[in-house]
């Protein structure tokens, strides 16, 4: 089974629209010949300039979040339809920062996944355990619960085209990467769960990323694991060195 690798950046709250244009222009030639798919998920205000700058290149642009309603009185939110109309193709859903800082629960994340799919976006569905949960030995149970709820009502075909990102919270922005064994163990467990829920073909098609302090030095070893199909990269996606990760 050959799943195409995906090198995805999550800029978080970084880069202005003009910085976005300059950075995408800078990255275009650096990643032009990569075998992997290259995606930058950017702040809402940067989507249009990013899409414009990436035009004609192999760089894809995604959003970092969205709301699950179509339109209406939801001050500050953006809809799936807006993201599509702006020219983006992907959307990160359920990042641990959304869950922890902005109080998003599994049910909300499920609604967002369904709405993103309905609009034709590829959801990058995030899951991950805290250090306390890892120490309690409940990592895989926790991840299974998060993914099971996120995928309620999602069809096998939709799951096959989606992306799941495993990001241990203790590894995000800390410089503390999960070991390749830890990352493979959980990504493998996610694939087993998808097989239980949807069958083997879907499990072999869905792409599962690792995220959490991925950098040019550790990406190749992580991405070589059988169930790790690429990375969701925060800090290191803000610099040209992301080229090395995209080629790992
Ligand atoms: P870092 O790569 O900065 O640890 O962030 C990971 C992340 O949260 C990507 O979504």
Image (cartoon, grey):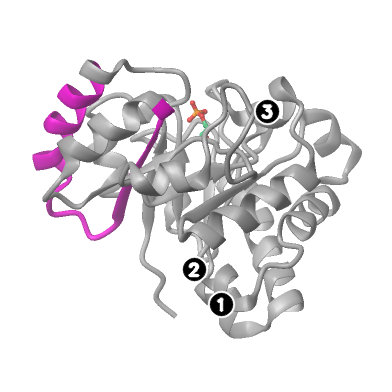
Q: Magenta region: which residues?
A: 19-44
Residue 109 percent across, percent down from the top left: 70, 45
Between marks 2 and 3 in the image, the one whose residue lies nearer the viewer: 2
Q: Can residue 163 be seen? A: no
Disc 2: which residue: 161
Q: Nearer the viewer, residue 49 or 146?
A: 49
Between marks 1 and 3 in the image, the one whose residue lies nearer the viewer: 1
Q: In the rendered structure, are the residues bearing label 2 and label 3 in contact, judged by CB atoms less than 8 Å apart?
A: no
Q: In the rendered structure, are the residues bearing label 1 and label 2 in contact, judged by CB atoms less than 8 Å apart?
A: yes
Taking the spot 46% from the left edge, 18% from the top edge, the residue there is 13
Q: Nearer the viewer, residue 99 or 65?
A: 65
Q: Is mark 1 within 8 Å of ligand 1?
A: no
| Residue count near mark 3 (Cα–Cα under 10 Å), binned few <14, some 14–19, many ≥20 | some
Disc 3: which residue: 170
Mark 3, secondary structure of its residue: helix
* Above or below, comparing residue 231 to residue 46 in the picture: below
Q: Can residue 99 be seen? A: yes
* Above or below, comparing residue 97 to residue 180 in the picture: above
| Residue count near mark 1 (Cα–Cα under 10 Å), binned few <14, some 14–19, many ≥20 | few
Q: In the rendered structure, are the residues bearing label 1 and label 3 in contact, judged by CB atoms less than 8 Å apart?
A: no
Q: Quadrant of the N terminus?
A: bottom left
Taking the spot 19% from the left edge, 32% from the top edge, the residue there is 24
Mark 2, secondary structure of its residue: loop
Tell me the tag on residue 157: 1
* Above or below, comparing residue 86 to residue 237 in the picture: below
Task: State how far apart marks 1 and 2 are (Cα).
Answer: 7 Å
Residue 158 percent across, percent down from the top left: 56, 70
Of callouts 2 and 3, which one flags the residue occurring earlier in the amino acid sequence? 2
Tell me the tag on residue 29: none
Of callouts 1 and 3, which one flags the residue occurring earlier in the amino acid sequence? 1
Mark 1, secondary structure of its residue: helix
């Amino acid at each position: 089974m050959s799943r195409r690798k995906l090198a995805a950046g999550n800029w978080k709250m970084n880069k202005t629209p003009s910085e976005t244009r300059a950075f995408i222009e800078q990255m275009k030639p650096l990643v032009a010949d990569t075998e992997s798919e290259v995606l930058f998920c950017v702040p809402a205000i940067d989507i249009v300039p990013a899409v414009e700058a990436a035009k004609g290149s192999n760089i894809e642009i995604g959003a970092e979040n969205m709301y699950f309603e179509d339109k209406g009185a939801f001050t500050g939110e953006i809809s799936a339809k807006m993201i599509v109309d702006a020219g983006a193709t992907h959307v990160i859903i359920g990042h641990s920062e959304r869950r922890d800082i902005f109080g998003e629960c599994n049910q909300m994340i499920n609604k967002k996944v369904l709405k993103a799919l309905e609009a034709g976006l590829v959801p990058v569905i995030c899951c991950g355990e805290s250090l306390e949960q890892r120490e309690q030995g409940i990592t895989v149970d926790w991840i299974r619960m998060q993914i099971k709820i996120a995928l309620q009502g999602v069809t096998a075909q939709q799951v096959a085209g989606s992306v799941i990102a495993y990001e241990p919270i203790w590894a995000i922005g800390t410089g503390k990467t999960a070991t390749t064994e830890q990352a493979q163990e959980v990504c493998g467990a996610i694939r087993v769960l998808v097989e239980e829920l949807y069958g083997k073909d879907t499990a072999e098609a869905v792409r599962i990323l690792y995220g959490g302090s991925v950098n040019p030095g550790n990406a190749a070893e992580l991405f070589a694991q059988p169930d790790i199909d690429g990375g969701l990269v925060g800090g290191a996606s803000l610099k040209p060195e992301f080229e090395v990760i995209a080629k790992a």
